[in-house]
Image (cartoon, rainbow, N blue to C red):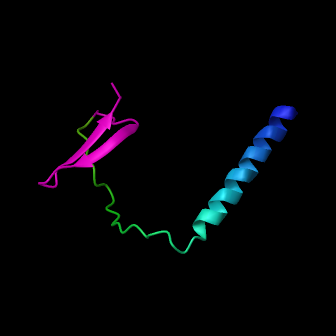
Amino acid sequence: MRNQSALLSIGLALFAASSVLAQTPDAPRIQYESIPDFIKMPTGLYMGEAMGVATNSRGDFYVFTRSG
């Protein structure tokens, strides 16, 4: 029961912090464009969790992953 109360308290604190941050008028908006199915993986290859993402000066897209 004590663990549940602690988790609830942490959850409420995070929710309150996110509400305050979401209402900050000084926070810059990050522009982005959503491109469905941007990454086309070869058949049978699963990327897994991405640890990092980068691009180079030519616009090539790199994903660092720890999958097998």
Q: State whether residue 16 is above or below residue 46.
A: below
Q: Horizontal and vertical percent for residue 3? A: 81, 33
**Given the current orientation, which residue lies at the most extreme left position?**
58
Outermost residue on the bottom side: it is 25
Give the image location of residue 39, x and y in percent: 27, 49
Q: Residue at x 16, y 55 (%)?
A: 59
Residue 59: say if magenta. Answer: yes
Figure quadrant of the N terminus: top right
Residue 30 against residue 60 in the figure, above or below: below
Quick check: is 57 in the magenta stretch? yes
- At 75% from the left and 52% from the top, the residue drawn is 12
Q: Which residues are magenta?
A: 44-68
Quarter of the image with the C terminus in it: top left
Residue 4 image offset from top left, x and y in percent: 82, 37
Q: Give the quarter of the image for residue 31.
A: bottom left
Residue at (44% x, 69% y) in the render: 28
Residue located farthest toward the top when viewing the structure as drawn: 68
